[in-house]
Amino acid sequence: MKYALVNNIKSEAQKGLKGKCQRCASEVIAKCGAYRIHHWSHKKTKSCDPWWETETEWHRRWKNCYPSNWQEFLFEDAENNEKHIADIHTEHNLVIEFQHSHIDPNERVSREKFYKNMIWVVDGTRLQRDYPRFQKWANGYRTAIKKDIFIVDSPEDVFPKNWLNSSVPVIFDFKGMEELVENNDLRHKLYCLFQVKIDHKSKYRIAEISRKAFINKTINGEWITKFQEYIENLKPKEEQTLQKQEIQAKPLKKQGSHYHDPKKGKWIKRWRF
């Protein structure tokens, strides 16, 4: 944990300090060694929140992109007394969870139901194969719908399967902690995977987003409205295209003295000789 309560004030770990956990109010001690990032640790138990994972420098770097009072925000469900600490909770009621380690699908679903309006940011450098297979798709198989929006026909060949059924947007960060030299390196950008219902079927789409734009839009509140507007605007356009293709593929229909011309979109009288 980056924060604990010291004299009821949310404070970062400093050598010699003792505090209380925001969630369970048990005693925590400051761990300020030379090799690991400074953090708070429970004195008697490993962690009181089953959703909590060991924080890496990657986590800390992402958290520090946001105001301190948005970080490690305590959520409470009054109905069942369930409590969890979200990585980021913005003033626009958006939760951002940074995920480095493997996550059980049941836990992923539980978190999405608990936080509701949320985004995952996933460390794409955890497994060595994750970026190479994404890079292979990006360099040869992606089809653009519009600028920076792409179709993914076989998402299981591009991303880890655990994230394909997420009900919320999943942002993949393939840069991790690496310093990139080339300006055109794919890893400079973030890649948002989401599902769109088209013709009653789930279609996968990827949005390519700059880090600066993502951070700015989640801070100023534009992310929620812009993303929702985009999803709603995308559905009709693709549905219309699919419907048009289906109509054109069908043979001319005959009904009595008229037939239907799909190109003209109307019934035309059949002349008899």
Image (cartoon, rainbow, N blue to C red):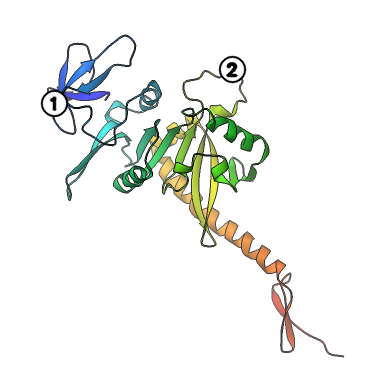
Work out which residue is located at the far top of the displayed protein and give it: 34
Q: Residue at x 59, y 40 (%)?
A: 148
Looking at the rendered image, the disc whose residue lies closer to the viewer, 2 or 1, is 2
Residue 115 rendering spot, x and y as whole percentages: 31, 44
Few, some or many C-alpha atoms within 10 Å of disc 1 (few <14, some 14-19, many ≥20)?
A: few
Residue 157 rendering spot, x and y as whole percentages: 57, 41
How many badges with numbers are in the image?
2
Determine the secondary structure under disc 1: loop
Displayed quadrant of residue 81? top left
Q: Residue at x 73, y 73 (%)?
A: 251
CB-based contact (under 8 Å), mark 2 and mark 1: no
Foreground of the two, 225 or 203: 203
Q: Amino acid at mark 2?
A: Val
Residue 84 rendering spot, x and y as whole percentages: 24, 38
Residue 59 visible here: yes
| Above or below 97: residue 167 | below
| Above or below 260: residue 61 | above
State the mark number for residue 134: none
Few, some or many C-alpha atoms within 10 Å of disc 2 (few <14, some 14-19, many ≥20)?
A: few
Quarter of the C terminus within the rendering: bottom right
Question: Which residue lies under the disc numbered 1?
Answer: 8
Is 233 situated left or right of 59 in this image?
A: right
Foreground of the two, 235 or 31: 31
Q: Residue at x 74, y 76 (%)?
A: 252
Residue 256 rendering spot, x and y as whole percentages: 72, 89
State the mark number for residue 181: 2
Determine the secondary structure under disc 2: loop
Q: Amino acid at mark 1?
A: Asn
Q: Which of pointers 2 and 1 lies earlier in the amino acid sequence?
A: 1
Task: For marks 2 and 1, give the CA distance.
Answer: 44 Å
